[in-house]
Image: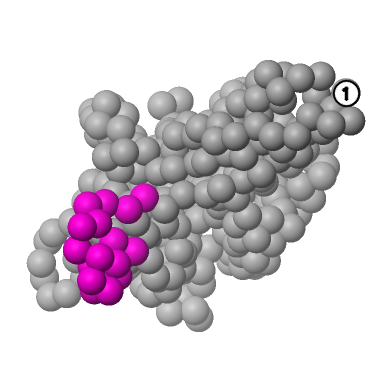
Amino acid sequence: MSRFKVALHIVPRRGLLDPQGKAVADALHTLGFKAVEDVHVGRHIVVEISARSALDAEKDARAMCERLLANPVTEDFEIAAVTGGTS
Amino acid sequence: MKFGIVTFPGSNCDHDTFHAIHDVLQEEAVYLWHKDHDLAGSDVVILPGGFSYGDYLRPGAIARFSPIMTEVIAHARRGGPVLCICNGFQIACEAGLLPGALLRNESLRFVSEPVRLRVENADTMFTNRYEAGQLLTMPIAHGDGRYTADDDTLDKLEGEGQIVLRYMLSAGDADEYWSPNGAMRAIAGIVSASGNVMGLMPHPERAADPLLGSSDGIGVFESMLARVAA
């Protein structure tokens, strides 16, 4: 078994009102970043997992997102990176 | 009739709920600890307001996996009444006892104020002591109360009479819906398709004793008493 770090991005589902994202976009516009089209504020979660392989670690992380880490009604998730693998 | 009030770490409306049932309604109430594995013979289960697990991750997301929730879900599946107030509503949505989700208020502000509500369906286990269309005043106090669901779910809730309470504009005599938190279709409270689980963001237990300014909320508890005892 090796230890992996799985980085997860959880973001509000597109199309749902995202008041935090809107507030940040407005602030960026105020600062002069006129090119900003849209902002989405979500969560970045890093889970450290013992697994046989990077593939297994990713599979475990996906199951965690489905059961707890993301709300299937309002959020989408993606596995951003799997790193490590040294025992 | 016995009401079981679940205390999660971070619940803070469990004592107010106990007061409403024990002192105002004069019925039996017991506290159930979130790590308990039985409901102590409760006829009705109440998931009270508060900030279970500090709202970490998402409000209700962690409480939903507390050991007692297995029993609460089994009780609901048997048709037992479950009243889910504020954080309880968030927990019930996370647990899949009710459809939809409660997201951060549109204003990004915590809102704590009395609101005007309209009883949209008075033919439920939780509202039979009210009249359809009756206006009530109860307090809300939440940062994450924006009821959200997809259009199909909202249409179904509407079509089946599952929208039980809506927020109303309180200024003047205006008879209009509005959302103090950005809730879709001004939804303040819903019931499950089976009718035995209710979730609402307003606090009926804080409006259950005339001494505290309003007793509009006691009808929710009286309704359950009338239905379950019958």
- List x then y, in percent, for residue B4: 70, 47
Range of magenta residues: A24-40
Q: Is residue B62 visible?
A: yes
- List x then y, in percent, for residue A13: 37, 38
Image quadrant in which the N terminus of chain B is located = top right
Disc 1 crowd rating (10 Å Cα; few below 14, some 14-19, many 20+) is few
Instruction: Say if B166 sits above or below B195 in the image.
Output: below
Depth order, front residue of A75/A26 = A26
Instruction: Say if B146 sits above or below B157 in the image.
Output: below
Q: Is residue B190 visible?
A: no
Relative placement, left or right, of B113 versus B35 is left
Depth order, front residue of A66/A6 = A6
- Which quadrant would residue B217 be assigned to in this image? bottom left
- Name the residue: 60% across, 34% down: A81
Tell me the SS state at disc 1.
loop
Relative placement, left or right, of A14 versus B211 is left
Residue denoted by label 1: A1
- Name the residue: 17% across, 74% down: B171
- Which quadrant would residue B155 be assigned to in this image? top left
Kind of residue sitting beneath label 1? Met
Instruction: State yes or no: residue B62 in magenta.
Output: no
Depth order, front residue of A21/B181 = A21
- Name the chain letter of the residue that bears numbered label 1: A
- Name the residue: 60% across, 57% down: B55
- List x then y, in percent, for residue B98: 47, 35
